[in-house]
Amino acid sequence: MNAHTGDRVAGIVREALGAAAAVRSSARLPGGASRETWSLDVDTPGGERALILRLDSPGAPLSPGTSPESGLAAEAVLMRAALEAGVPVPEIVAAGDSYILMARVDGETIPRKILRDDAYRRARPLLAAQCGRALAAVHRMPLDALPAQKEADALDQWRDVLDLTGQPHPVFELAFRRLAATRPAGARRTVVHGDFRNGNLIVGPEGVRAVLDWELAHAGDPVEDLGWLCVKAWRFGEKAPVGGFGTYDELVHAYEETSGHVVDREALRWWEAFGVLKWGVICVMQTMRHLAGGARSVELAAIGRRVCETEWDLLELLGAR
């Protein structure tokens, strides 16, 4: 941790826990291309606290459909509402416009470990159903927990983002046209997490312990979340279609049983294809952040190679091989 970040972290901790609170140790956690995540051990007059601090990274772009007010403070509001709705989330200790300080939940977030390590062998068969139940809880959250957002069509949002890059991607253009012509009629409008996937879950030996990263939450069709979880990128080399750990049936049956709503399988497939397309556009965006100098990062640069992978996945999903 450099001196500037160290001073910032220490100031946040003192403001949240009192002037006597002191950071005893800190470690930046892996991942987080758009935001930094720090694990902190903090000494306070009341004892040691195990905490997680999320910080905005410099040069991070706004997500489509969000406003400058839709920052980490708004994310904290969402997480508190999620807890009330029964979604497993960490306890929020304090929040500001550019940070969230929360209780540390023990467990694993790295997908390859979750999918392959023996420590999670018993958890893996449970995860798809647990995700279905967690998403049912997300979708019963009150819509007024969301920050003010500009209403926009999801396809139009991401088409506009791709256009702003100024780069030609014929497969993405084909996907936009095909999806526009086959759009399902969504009957429900709920809170949508927007990034519910393997990698944004804390998992223990018994299964899902917490749902993380609410920065893309918005109002929309709840099947969007189910489709996003099934995107091939979040299988991390495994064959199981739901996060690399489960089947469509396990996910859908648990969701339907908990929510009381039937999932249209064709709509699920549409939203899965939309998710692959969205991830492809995000890959372009993240690479452009690096190339434009907004955030010089090997991780962001490496994401650029994923663009061609998503193009291939889209061609398979659309039957255009």
Image (tube, rainbow, N blue to C red):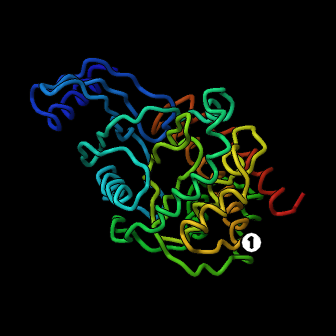
Q: Residue at x 87, y 62 (%)?
A: 319
Quarter of the figure with the C terminus: bottom right
Q: Residue at x 55, y 73 (%)?
A: 153
Q: Is residue 21 left or right of residue 253?
A: left
Q: Residue at x 33, y 35 (%)?
A: 53
Q: Quadrant of residue 274?
A: bottom right
Q: Is residue 137 left or right of residue 172?
A: left
Q: Quadrant of residue 15?
A: top left
Quarter of the figure with the N terminus: top left
Relative to 203, does residue 226 appear above or below in the rendering? below
Q: Residue at x 32, y 55 (%)?
A: 80
Q: Please, what secondary structure does the residue beneath circle 1 have?
A: helix
- Give the farthest residue toward the right: 321
Q: Quadrant of residue 110?
A: top right
Residue picked out by circle 1? 266
Type of amino acid at the residue the image marks with label 1: Glu
Q: Is residue 85 left or right of residue 69?
A: right
Relative to 124, does residue 48 appear above or below in the rendering? above
Q: Position of residue 227 (x, y in %)?
A: 65, 60
Q: Position of residue 184 (x, y in %)?
A: 68, 77
- Give the farthest residue toward the top: 24
Q: Do we see residue 70 in this rendering?
A: no
Q: Position of residue 40 (x, y in %)?
A: 32, 26
Q: Nearer the viewer, residue 267 or 202?
A: 202
